[in-house]
Amino acid sequence: MKSGKLLIAEPSVFGDQNFHRSIVIMVENKESGFLGFILNKPLAFEINDVLPEIKLSFPLYNGGPVEQDNLFFIHNAGHLIPKSTKIDDKLFWGGEFDKVVALVNDGMLSHNDIRFFLGYSGWSDEQLKQEISAKSWVVVENSLDSKILSHQPEGLWKDQMIALGGQYIIWSNTPENPYHN
């Protein structure tokens, strides 16, 4: 699977605490497996709650169940952040963190330019293939490009269900927990 693709959680993963209604952007494909970040699971605190050297408030997201004590970030500022890894033509991940702190504190990076995560989502090659075959995920191109960073997380899964069309449209209107209907 190519970096930059989105994994959209199928409605069938209800009850999965990590991936229910998740949208994951794939950022790396290596022989050891795949790495991505959940884009639409904001945490109850912000980046400056865990890193006081960042003076501005930025949402912090649950990137996935792996290494949740580590901070990661994706951004559209590869030209400003040395050692960034290219995801696609407009998105990057990682890079020199001291430079990120300076750019954020100087107002050079906004909420539309960068997203911070605790943890990541990871799969071995075979594991991801099995999950896709089992219809746990729909794989699509990231049609939002770098605008994915500014998209409101609450509506991202629903919007992707609508974009898929067909049988997915009905799922876009179901409540978060169908038992509360």
Image (tube, rainbow, N blue to C red):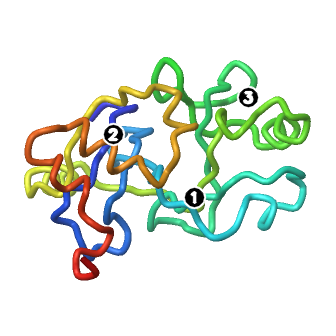
> Spatial distance from mark 2 to mark 3, Cα to Cα?
24 Å
Say which residue appears at 36% left-offset and 75% top-offset.
17
Q: Which residue matches tag 3?
A: 81
Secondary-structure class at tag 1: strand
Say which residue appears at 44% left-offset and 68% top-offset.
65
Which quarter shows the C terminus?
A: bottom left
On the picture, is 173 further left or further right than 40?
left
Q: Which mark is residue 6?
A: 2
Which quarter shows the N terminus?
A: top left
Query: Residue 72, image x and y in percent?
Result: 61, 51
Of residues 8 and 53, the one nearer the viewer is 8
Label 3 crowd bin: few (<14), some (14–19), many (20+), radius 10 Å: many
- Identify residue type, mark 1: Tyr
Secondary-structure class at tag 3: loop
- Identify residue type, mark 3: Ile
Mark nearer the N terminus (3 vs 1)? 1
Say which residue appears at 21% left-offset and 66% top-offset.
13
On the picture, is 66 further left or further right than 56?
left
